[in-house]
Amino acid sequence: MATSLRAAAKTIDWTKLSTSLPQETVASLQAFRKRNDEVKRVLGELKEQTTSVDFAHYRKVLKNQAVVDQAEKAVSGFKPVAFNLDAQLSAIDQFENKAVAKAENTVKQIEAELKDLHATLGNIEGSRPIEQLTVDDIIVAKPEITKNIEDMLQKGKFTIPGYKEKFGDISYF
């Protein structure tokens, strides 16, 4: 899997990618690539270094030979442990797949909302100015207003709830 990722990374056209992405993303991507190249360089240098220990030198320098024998035994008996990372990698892949699916759903929702907003904007831009509206136009648009006004008149209510709180009491008598 790692080799296929490396092969995919080598086939990326970085100049084309950098022109199609936002500036913040390009900057963070370039910083990531720089850190990655630096880590690769340091790893290469570390791999080139010898990892053997010259125990003969320590036997000459140190008086306590038992310590050198213990250290030599520990170093020669050291076996690196290999971990199976398949479970972690599959969990990461599942998480990535879920994140991509959620992102795709979000894109679809945003596109639908954007389409509705463009339609609403078109309606707003195409509507008449409020100065040209008549009471009849409002009644045609919202017929429930007539019913509400008739109900209020039958009940003897001549004030609109919340009007005084919003606009104040203009009665001077």
Image (tube, helix red, strand yellow):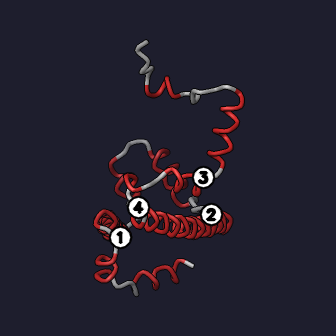
Between circles 3 and 1, the one closer to the viewer is 3
Q: Quadrant of residue 27?
A: bottom left
Q: CA distance from mark 3 to mark 1?
A: 69 Å
Split into 4 quadrants, where in the image is the N terminus?
A: bottom right
User: Which one is nearer the viewer's eye here, 102 or 12?
Assistant: 102
**Image mark for residue 95:** 2
Q: Amino acid at mark 2?
A: Phe
Answer with mark 2 or mark 4, whichever residue precedes in sequence.
Answer: 2
Give the structural element (helix, strand or loop) at label 2.
helix
Give the structural element (helix, strand or loop) at label 3.
loop
User: Which one is nearer the viewer's eye here, 101 or 159?
Assistant: 159
Between circles 3 and 2, the one closer to the viewer is 3
Residue 83 appears anywhere in the view: no
Q: Which residue is mark 1?
A: 40
Answer with mark 3 or mark 1, whichever residue precedes in sequence.
Answer: 1
Q: Amino acid at mark 4?
A: Arg
Crowding near the residue tagged with mark 4, few <14, some 14–19, many ≥20 C-alpha atoms within 10 Å: few
The residue under the point 41% across, 67% down is: 126
User: Which one is nearer the viewer's eye here, 76 or 26?
Assistant: 26
Q: Which residue is mark 4?
A: 128
Between circles 2 and 4, the one closer to the viewer is 4
146 sits left or right of 124 in the view: right
Q: CA distance from mark 4 to mark 3?
A: 16 Å
User: Which one is nearer the viewer's eye here, 22 or 160?
Assistant: 160
Q: CA distance from mark 2 to mark 4?
A: 51 Å
Q: CA distance from mark 3 to mark 2?
A: 49 Å
Q: CA distance from mark 1 to mark 4?
A: 65 Å
Answer with mark 3 or mark 2, whichever residue precedes in sequence.
Answer: 2
Q: Position of residue 38 (x, y in %)?
A: 30, 66
**Image mark for residue 142:** 3
Answer with mark 4 or mark 3, whichever residue precedes in sequence.
Answer: 4
Q: Position of residue 15 (x, y in %)?
A: 28, 82
